[in-house]
Structures are given as C-alpha cells and as structure tokens.
Image (cartoon, rainbow, N blue to C red):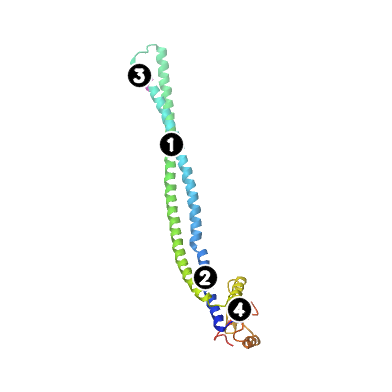
C-alpha cells in the first residue's frame, strides 16, 4: 500500500486523537464515583429495609401498648365499681362483703401486674422509637451521600463528554483527509492491536511495541519509497517515518 508521507503523518494525528478518545472513555468508565454510588445505593437500600422493619416494630409495639392500657383500664373500672358498691353500704351480708373485699384485693394485684406490663411495653416502644429515629437519620444521610456522589459523577460526565465532543470534531477534520484504504488498514490494526494501529518510528524504535530495530532493518525501511506504507515487523502496526525517525 502507498500513501503520501503527509497522509501517513496525519494518521499519527488520528492515532493521537483516537487514543485520547479511548482515554476519555476509560476515564468515564473508571470514575471513583461509580464505586461510591454502588456502595451508597446498597447502603441506602439496606437502610430503607431497616427503617421499614423498625417502623413495623414500632407499630406492633404501639398496638401492644394500647391493648395493655385497655386491660389496665378494664381492671381499674371494675375495681372502682366494686369500691363504689362497697362504699354505698348497700351490701350488708358479711360473706358478700368479704367476697367483694377479696375481689377488690385481687383486682388491685392484677392491676399492679398489668401496669408492670404497660411499663415494660413502654420501654420497648421507646427503644423502637429511638431505633426508627436513628435509622431514619442514617437513611437521610445515605440519601445525601448518594445524591452528592451522583452529582459529582454527572459533573465529571459533563466535563468528559464536552471534551469528547471537542475531540470528535477534531477527528472528523483529520479523518476527512486520510485516504480511505489507509484509514481502513489503520482501523483494522487498531482493533487488533489494543487501540494502536499506527505508530511513529522514533529514534530507531517502533513506538507501538517499543522494539528497537537493528541497523539492517532500519536500512531496509530506509530503502522503502517515501510513500510506501511500512509495517512494523514485530507488531504489524503501520510504522510512520518522520524527521525524528533516526534513519
Ligand atoms: Zn512495533
């Protein structure tokens, strides 16, 4: 294949542009914010589940407390009714009086027990409320962490994308003047050779694979016509001769 030396040098410009685009794409993929966002999302999801569970616990305990308070209230009103009957003097039979007093005593004991239960539930409810408050605060914090990381990622994306847009426009200008067959070969080699299809011959080395050429190889390259498209024997890339090639 033949191509004017100037077109071969333009291929180096194109290579520089494509490498720059590859770097930008790599930077976009490997922003530290991606890992931060993954972690923050996982934390946020886990905390949301914990908040829901804690709220359910709080609800259950609240209902338990209402029920226990109703139990106390029932015993208390029954006791009050008994006390009224006792105080009214309507009951005169010693046996009935004894039974009533006995029941009042039992109810007082029962009320005491039930009030203990109420206190125990209130303590649990307080713990449940504290847990909901703490977890809700942590959930809110995780939302902030996530939102901030996403904002930083989006800002980085915007910066990279603007740069990509600029470099792509440069690429269009350069690619328009590279001969089609040379561009095709370059594109194929670039795909095969990890993103580098054309390399400069610089100070006797292929800048694609860094191999240093023996004098005999350099002489062979030198003997090629200026418009011949030379390939590196070692890596197969298009080897572009420039003023600094050392030949
Ligand atoms: Zn090479």
Ligand 1 picture quarter: bottom right
- Identify the residue at image location x=45%, y=67%: 162
Q: Decide which of 203, 243 is in the foreground and name it.
A: 243
**Is residue 111 at all visible to an observer of this figure?**
yes
Q: Which mark is residue 62?
A: 1
Q: CA distance from mark 1 to mark 3?
A: 32 Å
Q: Answer with the quarter of the image where residue 246 lies.
A: bottom right
Is residue 84 magenta-colored? Answer: yes
Q: Main secondary structure of the magenta part?
A: helix
> Which of marks 3 and 1 precedes in the sequence?
1
Marks 2, 1: nearer the viewer: 2
Q: Which mark is residue 238?
A: 4
Q: Which mark is residue 21?
A: 2
Q: Is residue 132 above or below residue 82?
A: below
The magenta region covers 80-86
Q: Residues within 10 Å of mark 2 (few under 14, many from 20)?
A: some
């Amino acid at each position: 294949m033949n191509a004017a030396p100037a077109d071969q040098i333009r291929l180096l410009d194109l290579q520089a542009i494509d490498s720059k685009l590859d770097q930008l794409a790599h930077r976009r993929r490997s922003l530290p914010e991606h890992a931060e966002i993954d972690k923050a999302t996982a934390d946020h999801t886990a905390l949301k589940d914990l908040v829901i569970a804690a709220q359910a616990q709080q609800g259950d305990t609240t209902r338990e407390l209402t029920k226990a308070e109703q139990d106390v209230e029932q015993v208390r009103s029954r006791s009050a009714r008994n006390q009224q009957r006792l105080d009214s003097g309507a009951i005169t039979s010693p046996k009935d009086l004894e039974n009533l007093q006995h029941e009042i005593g039992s109810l007082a004991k029962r009320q005491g027990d039930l009030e203990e239960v109420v206190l125990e539930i209130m303590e649990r409810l307080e713990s449940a409320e504290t847990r909901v408050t703490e977890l809700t605060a942590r959930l809110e914090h995780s939302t902030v962490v996530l939102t901030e990381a996403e904002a930083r990622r989006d800002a980085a994306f915007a910066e990279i994308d603007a740069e990509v847009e600029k470099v792509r426009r440069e690429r269009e200008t350069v690619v328009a003047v590279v001969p089609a067959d040379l561009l095709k070969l370059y594109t194929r080699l670039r795909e095969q050779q990890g993103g580098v299809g054309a390399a400069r011959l610089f100070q006797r080395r292929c800048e694609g694979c860094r191999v240093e050429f023996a004098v005999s190889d350099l002489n062979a390259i030198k003997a090629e016509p200026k418009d011949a498209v030379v390939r590196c024997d070692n890596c197969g890339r298009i080897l572009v001769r420039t003023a600094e090639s050392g030949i």
